[in-house]
Image (tube, rainbow, N blue to C red):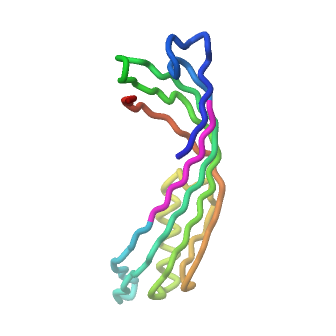
């Protein structure tokens, strides 16, 4: 996660401390398998076998404060880091499922308000399915640093 910072001179007592503004780029890559079973209304049990890959790229701005504790030890407060993220999903369905499964899945996802902005109708009956969308991202945190 590379980032560029500009430390405001009037808030710095030593080099690379005090309030700063900056920009960042973040890339994340996740892979997972989803195995399980689904029981249809007819009582038949279907095996679930999905492979999933998620790539996330985000860019944004940030403001923060780097507080020196000792000559070598510091605490970095990333106060706010709004940005935009590009989310790429790839699903590999190893076994096809009945239409009833997708209807139940979409009904269950409607209960999660975080997915409201996607307005998706998830169907993974194809062997390989990709989906991509952009969304707001936000970065914040506290880190402890040591300089040599």
Residue 70 drawn above or below residue 148: above
Magenta part of the chain: 22-30
Q: Give the image quarter of residue 138.
A: top right
Q: Kindly give the residue lying farthest to the front in the view shown.
A: 148
Residue at left offset 45%, top offset 88% = 95
Q: Along the line of sight, which residue is nearer the eye, 125 or 17?
A: 17
Q: Is residue 23 magenta?
A: yes
The residue at 65%/60% (across/down) is: 133
> In which quadrant will I find the C terminus?
top left
* Residue 100 on the magenta span: no
Main SS class of the magenta portion in the image:
strand
Quarter-of-image position of residue 38: bottom left
Q: Position of residue 131 (x, y in %)?
A: 61, 69
Total labels: the figure holds 0
The answer to whether residue 92 is above or below residue 120 is below
Left or right, 12 with respect to 148, comes to: right
Q: Which residue is located at x 55 percent, y 19 percent?
A: 19
Who is closer to the viewer here, 134 or 143?
A: 143
x, y (%) of residue 41?
40, 83
The quarter of the picture where residue 80 lies is top right
């Amino acid at each position: 996660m590379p980032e560029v910072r500009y430390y405001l001179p009037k808030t710095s007592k030593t080099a690379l401390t005090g309030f700063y503004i900056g920009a960042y780029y973040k890339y994340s890559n996740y892979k997972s398998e989803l195995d399980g079973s689904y029981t249809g209304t007819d009582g038949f049990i279907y095996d679930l076998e999905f492979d999933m890959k998620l790539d996330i790229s985000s860019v944004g701005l940030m403001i923060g404060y780097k507080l020196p504790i000792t000559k070598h030890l510091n605490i970095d407060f990333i106060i706010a880091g709004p940005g935009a993220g590009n989310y790429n999903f790839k699903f590999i369905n190893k076994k096809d499922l009945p239409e009833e499964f997708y209807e139940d899945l979409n009904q269950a996802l409607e209960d999660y308000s975080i997915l409201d902005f996607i307005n998706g109708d998830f169907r993974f009956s194809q062997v390989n399915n990709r989906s991509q969308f952009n969304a707001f991202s936000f970065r914040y945190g506290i880190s402890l640093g040591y300089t040599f």
